[in-house]
Image (cartoon, rainbow, N blue to C red):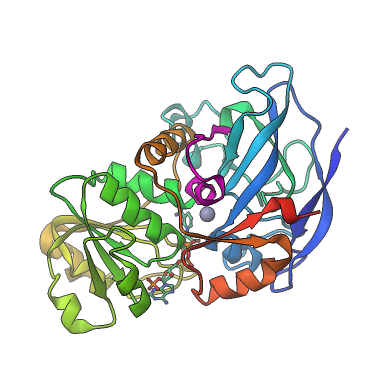
Amino acid sequence: MTESVKAIVAEEAGKSLQQKLIERRALQPDDVKIDILYCGICHSDLHLINDDFGGSKYPMVPGHEIVGSVTELGSAVTSFKVGDLAAVGCIVDSCGECASCKIDLQQFCEVGTTLSFNSPDKYLGGMTYGGYSKTYVCKDKYMLHMPSNLDLAAAAPLLCAGITVYSPLKHWKAGPGKVVGVLGIGGLGHMAIRIAKAMGAHVVVLTTSQSKIDDAKRLSADEAVLSTDASQMKKYASKIDLIIDTVSARHDVNMYLDLLAIDGSMVLVGLPDSALEVQPFKVVKGRRSFAGSNIGGIGETQEMLEFCSKHGIVADIELIPAERINEALTRLAKHDVKYRFVIDMATLN
Ligand code: NAP
Ligand code: ZN
């Protein structure tokens, strides 16, 4: 039997979200059910609510930065106990057998990754419903173990913002002796500063906001550059080894490619809704790369949680009650959040 639970629902693009009942599936033998304690609000939620990419299906329950506690186990589950802290990120299923799944890159599953919301739901039909809700049901292999030493509300953003920057920082070998630029200091960007610093890199913030220049040191960056000031930008020409680009809107990437050292890489994780133009000479000069990265696999997400637990890394959050969701989304669209909204699910009744 399905279970009716309260959720925050987008009924169509551009409309205010509302509290409604949705159905969660009855537990399968390999399922784990959690009561959701906190869910972060990612800019991807906003893109999908607004149908920025054209693939949104409504009604939609957004949310993929989900932290909770286990309340029920399917008959075959041995890796969790009732009462454990657990988490769900962006990925809730994949084929498990293709070349990508075999190397823990379930986000590139050749058959198709099931995301925690707005993906076809194999059990109930329709689309998966995300974490702006009271409960989540997920296969044990895709459920994560949540470290107990972190503030749980502030740790929720690790489930998307954290892994999305951890994965490319690790892949492109951020560490001692490397200069890492972080472009766009929002939810992803401020996590990238802390994670790159904990990996041992020298971190340079690249921001359009003066107030974030003032905040950069507190966030543990070594240097900060106001990207709208050409004279400040010029000083960093050919100085940066790796830039993580988290900008959510269309922007000129060429002025940042100029900052890359020889063999440097600029890695796009932000998802502007239209094409970006790369000028050929900006990459042929210096043998530079312009690349991209998408979240991270389940094993790597668990590894990131352990890394953040060890280094005490969480997000700076503004905890909101469920009733303030529409105000939070309006403010997120204006970059008016330092640095992540998180919904306190105890307030959704
Ligand atoms: P966010 O909190 O809104 O931060 C985005 C930041 O980008 C802003 O704070 C701002 O930083 C900068 N920015 C925005 N518009 C800009 C513009 N026109 N020009 C220059 N800078 C601008 O968003 P988020 O949650 O961190 O997500 C960032 C992007 O990553 C979104 O597009 C999201 O969908 C995407 N995302 C991708 C993945 C993936 O796996 N690839 C995963 C999660 C999210 P400053 O004020 O510092 O300039
Ligand atoms: Zn996200």
Give the quarter of the image for residue 243.
bottom left
- Give the residue displayed 55% in from the left and 60% down from the top: 44
Give the quarter of the image for residue 331.
bottom right
Determine whether 42 is above or below 164 in the image. Answer: below
- Give the residue displayed 34% in from the left and 69% down from the top: 215
Give the quarter of the image for residue 242.
bottom left
* Residue 165 image offset from top left, x and y in percent: 38, 51
* Residue 105 image offset from top left, x and y in percent: 44, 36
Q: Based on the picture, tell me whether residue 65 belongs to the magenta stretch.
A: no
The one of 292 and 317 positioned closer to us in this rendering: 317
The count of marks equals 0
> Which residue reaches farthest right?
1
* Residue 212 image offset from top left, x and y in percent: 35, 72
* Residue 4 image offset from top left, x and y in percent: 86, 44
Q: From where the camera sits, is residue 189 visible?
A: yes
Q: What stretch is highlighted in magenta?
A: 143-159
Q: From where the camera sits, is residue 209 visible?
A: no
Ligand 1's quadrant = bottom left
- Give the residue displayed 75% in from the left and 25% down from the top: 28
